[in-house]
Image (cartoon, grey):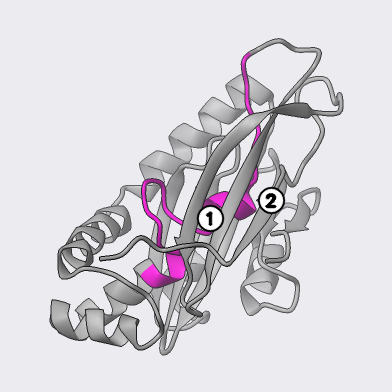
Amino acid sequence: MSKVEPKAIKVYKPEIMNCPKCNAKLVFAYTASNKVIQFSSGKIIKIKNMAYRCPNCNDGNIYSSLTAHKMSLKGYTYSTKVICTIEYYKSMHKSREEICDMLASKDIEISDRNVDIIYKKIKGIMELDSDKLVKESYERQMKEFNEIRIAVDHITINPYHYVVFYDYFNGEILGLWKCEGTDDPKLHERLKKYLNNPNIKYIVTVRPQSKVYGILKSYAPNSSKFLSFAKF
């Protein structure tokens, strides 16, 4: 498979530019990641995720963009939507060769070996114990920052919806759920449970026009501040 070349470069900085501990303006530290991603549209773009730090706290904490991070799973150069698409095709019992051909029709280069590797990876993520991970994440955030920040992404691959729940501070995935629409009772049960915490200060997520945004808003504490992922 030939090396893919980006057609454009996009740069992202943290969505929240103030230190959670002292409220000082964050300053640039270094480039956290700089990778080429193939998107479901067929576009190939280099995404630069800029890491920032607090100039006062000197605590070693680094803050980066969840918009850039959520575009592609760690260690992969395909967008999260492409990865979810592979899971969808596999669930429809498509062969590796069929999946490669379908993605190639969208100008996405991938080997049949990578199809299997990615499918195994995303199935592992979908089987995570979200109750345990969310609990541990919230406890860690409160201990370190005295507040909770999360991010929630929403990917549609008809007829299914994939919802990804992140720890905002370190970008770790706390849950990835495949739902039969945004009215899926299991989705509502999870979000209601995980958002029922008065210490959630920020929720970085999809734009207000999305139905998922309205669901999050209905379950989140009134004091939580909503921010949208930066435009792509």
- Marks 2 and 1, Cα distance to the nearest angstrom? 14 Å
Question: Looking at the image, which is closer to me, 72 or 91?
Answer: 72
Residue at 33% over, 81% down: 103
Q: Is residue 110 magenta?
A: no
Q: How many labels does the image show?
A: 2
Sequence-earlier tag: 2 or 1: 2
User: Which quadrant does the C terminus fall into?
Assistant: bottom right
Question: Which percent across, then down, holds residue 216?
Answer: 65, 64
Using residue 225 as the reference point, say whether residue 137 is left or right of it. left
Question: Which percent across, then down, holds residue 126?
Answer: 31, 59
Using residue 141 as the reference point, say whether residue 164 is left or right of it. left
Three-letter amino acid code of the residue under disc 2: Val
The numbered disc on residue 60 is: none
Label 1 Cα crowd, 10 Å radius (few <14 / some 14-19 / many 20+): many
Using residue 102 as the reference point, say whether residue 51 is left or right of it. right
Look at the numbered disc 1 and give the secondary structure of its residue. Answer: helix
Question: Looking at the image, which is closer to me, 125 or 13?
Answer: 13
User: Which quadrant does the N terminus fall into?
Assistant: bottom left
The numbered disc on residue 70 is: 1
Look at the numbered disc 2 and give the secondary structure of its residue. Answer: strand
Prevailing secondary structure of the magenta residues: loop
Label 2 Cα crowd, 10 Å radius (few <14 / some 14-19 / many 20+): some
Residue interval drawn in magenta: 60-82
Question: Looking at the image, which is closer to me, 121 or 212?
Answer: 121
Instruction: Nearest to the eye among marks 2 and 1: give it.
Output: 2
Using residue 195 as the reference point, say whether residue 106 is left or right of it. left
Residue at which label 2 appears: 11
Question: Which percent across, then down, holds residue 49?
Answer: 61, 44
Residue at 69% over, 38% down: 199
Q: Is residue 63 magenta?
A: yes
Three-letter amino acid code of the residue under disc 1: Lys
Residue at 37% over, 40% down: 132
